[in-house]
Amino acid sequence: MSVVSLIAGASVLVQIVMLLLLLASVFSWYYIFIKVFTLRRARRLAADFEREFWSGADLNELYQRAVGARRSAGSLERIFEAGFREFMKYRKQPGIDVADMMDGTRRAMRATYQRETERLESSLSFLASVGSVSPYVGLFGTVWGIMNSFRGLANVAQATLGHVAPGIAEALIATAMGLFAAIPAVIAYNRFAGDINKLATRFESFMEEFSNILQRQAH
């Protein structure tokens, strides 16, 4: 009883369940590899920008560079660009209150922060769905296969293990495939969620420190 023969001998519904689980696993691994490189790039760009920012570089030069490289800029650089652009707009208005100026600057950075975190969190919901649903889908295929196996025993005068074993083995493959799809998705989701939370904390810390710098300039 090879695995291929067991899959080929399963009922149509169980085969459909196995195909769905296989597709879910393939898409999960695709998103996992994409997310690994995306988060690695996000961490590298954030570290590079922080190093340049805290080295004492001129804010106007950093802003012009961020505007010129908007497509390739990292999340932290986009947050800086949004905040500094809003700050300069308010600063050109005569008689503007410092509190209103800083409130608008923080809102601009917060809006960009939300967009960047949503972009980093893309496809995480798919991994979470695969991780939570796949075992139950596989279990459904297993239950259906076992039901068919026992129904087939109705036409057998003497039931033996040889009659039951192939059907049960076919059914259990669906559960195995469900776990095969779910386990990597759950591990990847937890790892990526932790990495994104660390990046989000990093972005929020920068926003607070940058707001303090702009507030001192406003005064």
Image: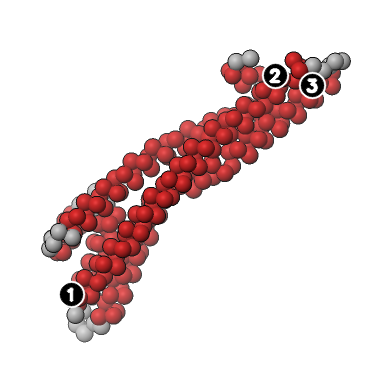
Q: CA distance from mark 1 to mark 2?
A: 77 Å
Point 31% across, 63% down: residue: 205
- From the viewer's perspective, tell me whether residue 14 is left or right of residue 57: right
Q: Is residue 111 above or below residue 149?
A: below
Toward the right, the furthest residue is 157
| Pointer 3 residue | 152
Dot 2 falls on a residue whose secondary structure is: helix
Above or below for 201 versus 6: below
Sequence-wise, which precedes: disc 3 or disc 1? 3
User: Which residue occupies 19% across, 82% down?
Assistant: 94
Say which residue label 2 marks.
166
N-term-proximal mark, 2 vs 3? 3
Marks 1 and 2, the one that precedes in the sequence: 2
Amino acid tagged 3: Gly
Q: Is residue 97 left or right of residue 125?
A: left
Residue 18 x %, y %: 59, 29
Could you tell me the amino acid type at mark 2? Answer: Pro
Q: Amino acid at mark 1?
A: Gln
Residue 3 left/right relative to 162: left
What residue is disc 1 on? 217
Is residue 215 visible to us here?
A: yes
Quadrant for the N terminus, please.
top right
**The residue tagged with tag 3: helix, strand or loop?**
helix
User: Does 97 appear above or below 62?
Assistant: below
Above or below, comparing residue 75 to residue 140 in the picture: below
Viewer-side label of 2, 3: 2
x%, y% of residue 86? Answer: 25, 69
Q: Residue 65: image x %, image y %? A: 16, 56
